[in-house]
Amino acid sequence: MSGLYIDETLILDDLGETTKEGVLRTLATNLHQQGLVSESYIQAVIDRENEYATGLPTKGPSVAIPHTDKEHVLTKTLSVGVLAHPVDFGVMGEREQTTPVELIFMLAMDDEHTQLHMLQRLMNIFQDKDQLEFYKNTKDKTERKKALAEALELSRQGGETT
Amino acid sequence: MKKRVLVACGTGIATSTVVNDAIEKMCKNHDIEAEVIQCKISEIAGYEDSADLLVTTTVTKKDYPFPVINARSFLTGIGTEETEQEILDALKQ
């Protein structure tokens, strides 16, 4: 989809952080260092996760989609974190439940109307166990980015992911 | 009578966008006349007197005078049919 920025510097592998805050801070700080979000995004995304959890149990590895209000976002983008060890995140829409998250898709979104397509493609990934396993297990960053770009139809050549 | 459905998440721009689209399609497929309003969960109070249903991906922190349905299944694909049925039942009342 046009207008969404993604490159390999936004895919962080083998993240060793053992806490939710640590994981969020590392990913958000990287986004800030790349000039894609304001510094305030870092704390805002942590606070938002504590208030409204974004962990999602799937048929494969659990994922989380931390994000926050658009005023902290400079460029619409997506950052992916692959965790070395599962880290517990609250389950979206649940008061107490947590889920051991292995893949983070941190969203920096700036508009409610232009991102439906990208979000739907992202949800398709979450419903595809094999694809989630691939993102979790592959050691090849370039391959991961390519697969992600195709799955999100960042290039129109991607086609359906099965 | 036209139903007013609120779709909310924490920011009003991310997960609610996906849920909003799913519900609009569902209403169309089932010939249900509905006005679907996408908003932040913190904005729900403003619609309290006029809404028929709240579909949300977040925890709700208070009681509302209309049914509240959790829509996480639209994101994960786990239990989608049950959620759709729940929404249809609520809208057909």
Image (tube, rainbow, N blue to C red):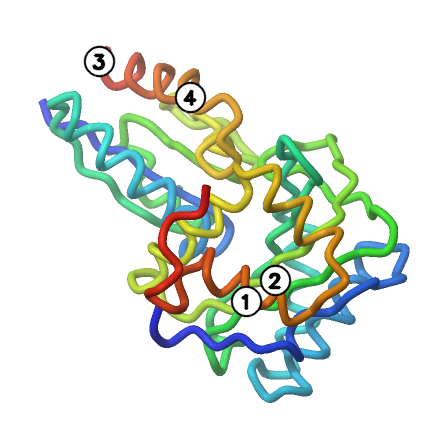
Q: In this picture, is A2 found above or below A65?
A: below
User: Which label belongs to residue A106?
Assistant: 2
The residue that label 3 is drawn on is B92
Q: Nearer the viewer, mark 1 or mark 4?
A: 1
Amino acid of disc 4 = Thr
The residue that label 1 is drawn on is A146
Residue placed most toward the observer, A94 or A100: A100
Q: Nearer the viewer, mark 2 or mark 3?
A: 2
Amino acid of disc 2 = Met
Q: CA distance from mark 2 to mark 4?
A: 26 Å
Residue B26, quarter of picture: top left
The residue drawn where x is 72% and y is 66% is A140
Residue count near mark 1 (Cα–Cα under 10 Å), binned few <14, some 14–19, many ≥20:
some
Q: In this picture, is B13 found above or below B46?
A: below
The residue drawn where x is 73% and y is 57% is A138
Chain letter of mark 2 equals A
The residue that label 4 is drawn on is B83
Residue placed most toward the observer, B62 or A36: A36
Chain letter of mark 3 equals B
The residue drawn where x is 44% and y is 59% is A152
Q: Nearer the viewer, mark 2 or mark 1?
A: 1
Count of numbered circles in the view: 4
In the picture, measured across the screen, residue A130 lies left or right of residue B30, that is right
Residue A133: where, in percent of width, then height? 68, 44
